[in-house]
Amino acid sequence: MTSCSIVIPVHNHAALTRQCLEALMASPVEGALLEIVVVDDGSTDSTPDLLADYLENVRVVRHEQASGFAGACNDGAAAASGDWLVFLNNDTIPEPGWLDALLRYASEREQVGFTGAKLLFPNGRIQHAGVVFARNLSPHHIYAGFPSDHPAVNKSREFQVVTAACGLIRRELFDEAGAFDQAFVNGYEDIDLCLRLRRLGYEVHYCHESVVSHLESATRYALSDQAGLELFLARWSNFVFQDDVLYYVADHLIDIAYWERYPALLSVSPLLAVLDERATATERLLAERSKELVEAHKENTRLQVELLEAAARDSLR
């Protein structure tokens, strides 16, 4: 029988960890032995007390000081016993069947090295449906903010990279690739791992049937994004390639029609983009409104997390 270990790195935010664990335990996996490994990466809140309540169902690894995402995940993987490893953020709420879908998808494809899930913002829109690279090779979550029922996000397929906020990998491949590189500090570790797997000849895929809600960045440590980006570019700029437009064209969100002579006719879905230099007043207003909604959503998520944690603190008094 297949065995699978879910590795959850945590640093404070005990209420979110409880929410995640309760969701996992409410959704048993069919045909697989399941193990949950939580790595407490130097938490200073009530997380140790919380995890003590789950010792019958959860294996706990404790760090006295925070080592970061890569170190926590690596130590969790070292303590895990499963043939498969799932890395899962604690600010997630997996939907029923999420892990069955990941295991089924990866098991049917021998060349798949890492498989990512469909991640949703709390409002039900897309947070992750694969990662693409722009012309300057900066990575971006494709279709972030799209409706979750849009055809473009409901097709499982290959990408150069997916996020490890929820990702599945065979244990032996994780070891073969060399685990997460702790030279990255809470950013770009998953990108680096996916690219190392691709360099070894394995594929990286997005599985749209595995659905998880994600409070993106709610539990992230202090970031060192610029340093991580510079290290990523120094290591991978000759390997990774721009692919964002390829997906937009394949998904019929950008189309080009040709006359006998140029200029060609370019059509772009308004759901995807507005024109920059010749944007109409309406388009500029829509773009600005979109930015405002994103910021409002981030603030709402932050407040939701604070309320959840306050309720958890009150229950301990």
Image (cartoon, helix red, strand yellow):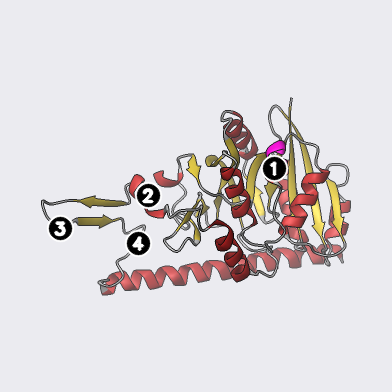
Identify the element where label 4 is drawn. Answer: loop
Position of residue 105 measured from the top left corner of the image (x, y, whole percent) = 57, 33
Q: Earlier in the sequence, mark 1 or mark 2?
A: 1
Marks 3 and 2 close (CB-CB < 8 Å) = no
Disc 1 to disc 3, C-alpha distance:
50 Å
Which image quarter holds the N terminus?
Answer: top right
Disc 4 to disc 2, C-alpha distance:
15 Å
Q: Residue furthest left?
A: 260
- Residue 150 visible somewhere in the drawing: no
Q: Earlier in the sequence, mark 3 or mark 2?
A: 2
Please tell me the numbered disc located at residue 246.
Answer: 2
Position of residue 80 measured from the top left corner of the image (x, y, whole percent) = 80, 41
- The residue singled out by tag 3 in the image is 262
Which image quarter holds the C terminus?
Answer: bottom right
The foreground one among 129 and 238 is 238
Q: Residues within 10 Å of mark 2 (few under 14, many from 20)?
A: few
